[in-house]
Amino acid sequence: MPLGTLRPSPLVEQATEHLREQITGGHWPVGTRLPGENALAKTLGVGRSTVREALRALAGAGLVQARQGSGVFVIATEPAADWPTRLRRAAITDVYEVRMMVETQAARLAAARRTDEDLASLEAALQARRTAAGGDDAGFVDADIALHAAVVAAARNPVLDDLFAEFAPALRGRLVDVVELLGLRETEPNPGDDAHAALVDAIREGDGQAASDILQAELEQTLAMLHRNAV
């Protein structure tokens, strides 16, 4: 498939897509050294800066690698899966183990850093979880995740916020399936209410160790259930 001159806009996106097609289509196999920036710019009808940005995008996708003094080489013919995709494909038990590490430390930080606004958000989220217990499984899982998100937010660390935001979609769908499949709310519509209330109390009291321990025990219990049922 030959390269062709590009339309005026948006040039970087078009250049990236054309070069990607050459790689994924097998025109440039793994190990191939790409033509230089000047040659690519002339063929595509764009400036060198556009080619440079396109190559950066391809490097970010794991398709090419620049080697000092040697040029840019193809290192893969399929883009590397991004983080959200990898989370969706991962076993829920693996995701839960990492979630536990992140959230227990977030709870510890939340106890030290929470503001009055955070405490109000935690109380509201706890009450929302209790209210959701009277509804369907999907709504209850959403309310549960929202309470955990409020704990993470109280840690006042934007990186932790971003990490949890990445985990939440990967967890949500599968947790709804697990709750429904195993009938976890058939006898107790609001499982874990005491533990979640104790977690909010510990954060309010500034007891980081207690907050971390409570959350660790709660998540470990769920993880053990997931392992037992091989989900």
Image (cartoon, rainbow, N blue to C red):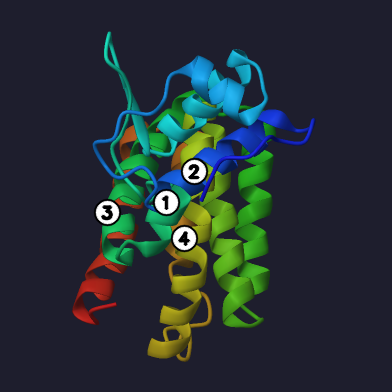
Q: Answer few, some or many: residues within 10 Å of disc 2's Cα (few below 14, many 20 plus, some between 14 and 19).
A: many
Q: Is residue 94 visible?
A: yes
Number of the front mark, 3 or 2: 2
Where is residue 62 drawn, in percent x and y? 37, 38
Amino acid type assigned to the residue bearing label 2 in the image:
Arg
Question: Which dot marks residue 20?
Answer: 2
Q: Earlier in the sequence, mark 3 or mark 4?
A: 3
Q: Earlier in the sequence, mark 4 or mark 1?
A: 1
Q: Which residue is mark 3?
A: 97
Q: Which residue is mark 4?
A: 170
Task: Please tell me whether mark 2 sits on a helix, a strand or a loop.
Answer: helix
Number of the front mark, 3 or 1: 1
Q: Is residue 229 above or below residue 142?
A: below
Q: Earlier in the sequence, mark 2 or mark 4?
A: 2
Where is residue 146 drawn, in percent x and y? 59, 55
Give the alpha-carbon distance from disc 1 to disc 2, as whole Å: 6 Å
Give the alpha-carbon distance from disc 4 to disc 1, as whole Å: 28 Å
Amino acid type assigned to the residue bearing label 4 in the image:
Ala
Q: Residue at x 22, y 69 (%)?
A: 224
Q: Residue at x 48, y 27 (%)?
A: 55
Q: Answer few, some or many: residues within 10 Å of disc 3's Cα (few below 14, many 20 plus, some between 14 and 19).
A: few
Q: Is residue 90 left or right of residue 183?
A: left
Q: Answer few, some or many: residues within 10 Å of disc 1's Cα (few below 14, many 20 plus, some between 14 and 19).
A: some
Q: Quadrant of residue 45?
A: top right
